[in-house]
Image (tube, rainbow, N blue to C red):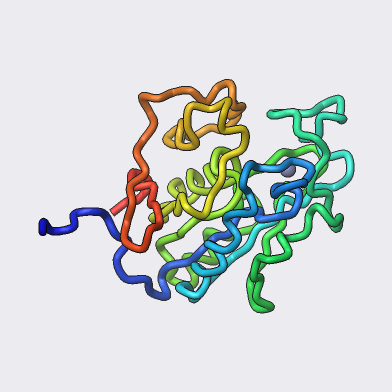
Amino acid sequence: MTEDKKPTVGELTASDALIVVDVQKDFCANGALAVPEGEKVVPVINRLQDLFVTVIFSRDWHPPGHVSFSTEPKFVDGSWPKHCVAGSDGAAFHPQLHVPLYAKVIDKATEKDRESYSVFDAGDLAEEFRGQQINRLFVVGLATNYCVRATVLDGLKEGFRMVVIADACRTYRPALCKGPWTKWRRPALSSSTPENCPDRSKTAKAQPVRGGLLIFQPIVIP
Ligand SMILES: [Zn+2]
């Protein structure tokens, strides 16, 4: 037997946190903006939560008439159908997702005229993590090529070590994109429509680790 050289994330400690991005009904089966197999992340995330001291949940949480909706004359980036209107049934977390009472919930894209994908856009999350001596962030949820990616890129800019657990993410419109991991090293998201995704030269490989999870290895900053 050869030594197993596959990457691992090492031991999880209190300096690690899990960010669960937008696992909401509208992004799952039969939702207004369904991500294929979006609901399949739920059991994986439920298991993962037990490994972390700090778990944070985000919600896409739009006011009516949000600028990202294709019904709005000024819609931007994506032409989304109306989805995740604050307080609506579709904006609720997936009913099987475990959201502990003590968990921090971050609502994002709450301003009518401003689109926002990154969890870091809402509040002072980076400072809060630093205050808690958290330096490595594991990101899971929906969708890989939008809010998960934006959150990871912002986390890197803030100086955190970032780990994406691919097994607990799903991609929006994967058929129109050459892969969920395209353009991850690009700082800007302004041209992040699926049509602009193909950039295979920048595509990195997801690599399996023990336990059957997948880590997007190039995102891990040692
Ligand atoms: Zn949205």
Residue 40 screen position, x and y as percent: 59, 54
In the visual, does 131 lie left or right of 101? left
Q: Quadrant of ligand 1?
A: top right
Height in image: 135 above or below 67?
A: below
State whether residue 120 appears in this view. Answer: no
At 48% across and 51% down in the image, what residue appears? 155
Q: Position of residue 119 (x, y in %)?
A: 61, 52
Considering every residue shown, the one lying at the far front of the view is 1
Which quadrant of the figure contains the C terminus?
Answer: bottom left
Q: Is residue 219 above or below residue 173?
A: below
Quadrant containing the N terminus in the rendered view: bottom left
Number of callouts:
0
User: Viewed as shown, does residue 130 lie left or right of 115?
Assistant: left
Residue drawn at (40%, 57%), measured in percent from left and top?
213
Residue 157 in the image: x percent, y percent?
Answer: 45, 46
Quadrant of residue 2 within the rendered picture: bottom left
Q: Residue furthest left?
A: 1
124 or 82, nearer to the observer: 82
Residue at figure coordinates x 72%, y 50% from the top left = 60
User: Which residue sits at x=69%, y=78%?
Assistant: 101
Quadrant in which residue 33 is drawn? top right
Q: Position of residue 148 (x, y in %)?
A: 55, 47
Choose top left, top right, bottom left or bottom right for residue 6: bottom left
**Can residue 206 be spotted in the picture?**
yes
Up-down: is 89 above or below 34? below
